[in-house]
Amino acid sequence: MFTGKNSLRKHLKQRRAALSSEERINAAVRILDYIRSAEWWKQSSMIHCYCANGTEVPTQALIEAAFREGKRVLVPITPEQGTTLHHAEIFPDTRFTTDKYGIPIPTPETSRRCEEPVLVLTPEDCVFVPLLGYDAALNRIGYGGGFYDRFLSTFLLQRSQRPVFVGLAYSVQFVEGGVNAEKHDIMLDCVVTDQSVIAPCYDMFVTTRPVAGEIRR
């Protein structure tokens, strides 16, 4: 039993860290396969994708796939001060360094600053969201900084329609008892894991069903 979100976060970090490198690599391959079979991926011309850090689901192969398919790519940049994410468009030849948290960030001279992603991302595009935990109702638990809840909320405040919000996670990050969602928490449209795709209507999000033996929650 967890006494609060911080204790749950600690537990979820430990579960994710317990995966071996081989398990994480294999899981990432399956996650990418699920993504590339999804209708929202096929119809998107631009994606917003986090740059993975530590034991998060890796996104480099996902970004490379987007470039191969002619999609534009935006990435977030965590500010050194303040609570609002910055954003940049990256390119196949973009170079990266790391910020104080160890998160990869594009160098200014090889990327292009994007001040208002809410204005350039259409309802046909998608935003890939990092998370520590998720539940069957598509609630997510993040790292506690609120960066993504604030970012995603801008779409709800400024647009009648928004991009598809997609969480990426390993199946071990599933919260059986549910995430205690708060008023400011933004629900996802879909969570893609190595074992399942969780979405309100599965057929709307995936055109290729899992093979026998795979889990679909």
Image (cartoon, rainbow, N blue to C red):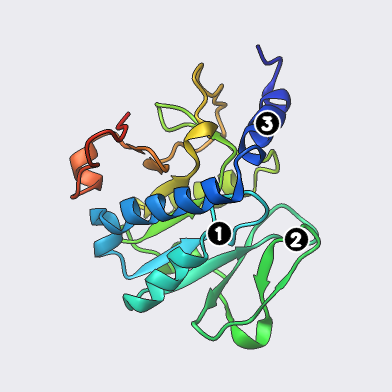
Which label belongs to residue 9? 3
Q: Quadrant of residue 189?
A: top left
Comparing marks 1 and 2, which lies closer to the viewer?
A: 2
Is residue 152 shown left or right of residue 217? right
Q: Which mark is residue 102?
A: 2
Which of the two discs, 2 and 3, labels the residue nearer the N terminus? 3
Q: CB of mark 1 within 8 Å of CB of mark 3?
A: no
Residue at disc 2, secondary structure: loop
In the rendered image of this protein, does residue 140 appear above or below residue 7?
below
Q: What is the x, y in percent for residue 88?
A: 57, 73
Kindly identify the amino acid type of the residue bearing the numbered disc 2. Answer: Gly
Residue located beneath label 1 in the image: 50
Left or right: 7 in relation to 43: right
**Left or right: 103, with 148 as reference point:** right
What residue lies at 40% left-to-right and 50% top-to-bottom? Answer: 31
Q: Residue 201 occupies which quadrant of the picture?
A: top left
* Residue at the extreme top of the image, as rendered: 1
Percent position of residue 117, x then y: 49, 65
Q: Is residue 161 visible?
A: no
Q: Give the tally of numbered discs.
A: 3
- For the residues labelled 2 and 3, the Cα–Cα distance comes to 19 Å
Verify CB contact (< 8 Å) between mark 1 and mark 2.
no
Q: Hey, what amino acid is under mark 3? A: Arg
Q: Quadrant of the N terminus?
A: top right
Residue 110 rendering spot, x and y as whole percentages: 61, 86
Q: Position of 36 compared to 158: left or right? A: left
Residue 183 screen position, x and y as percent: 55, 28
Could you tell me how far apart the alpha carbons at marks 1 and 3 are, in whole angstroms?
19 Å
Identify the amino acid type marked 1.
Tyr
Q: Residues within 10 Å of mark 3 (few under 14, many from 20)?
A: many
Q: Residues within 10 Å of mark 1 (few under 14, many from 20)?
A: many
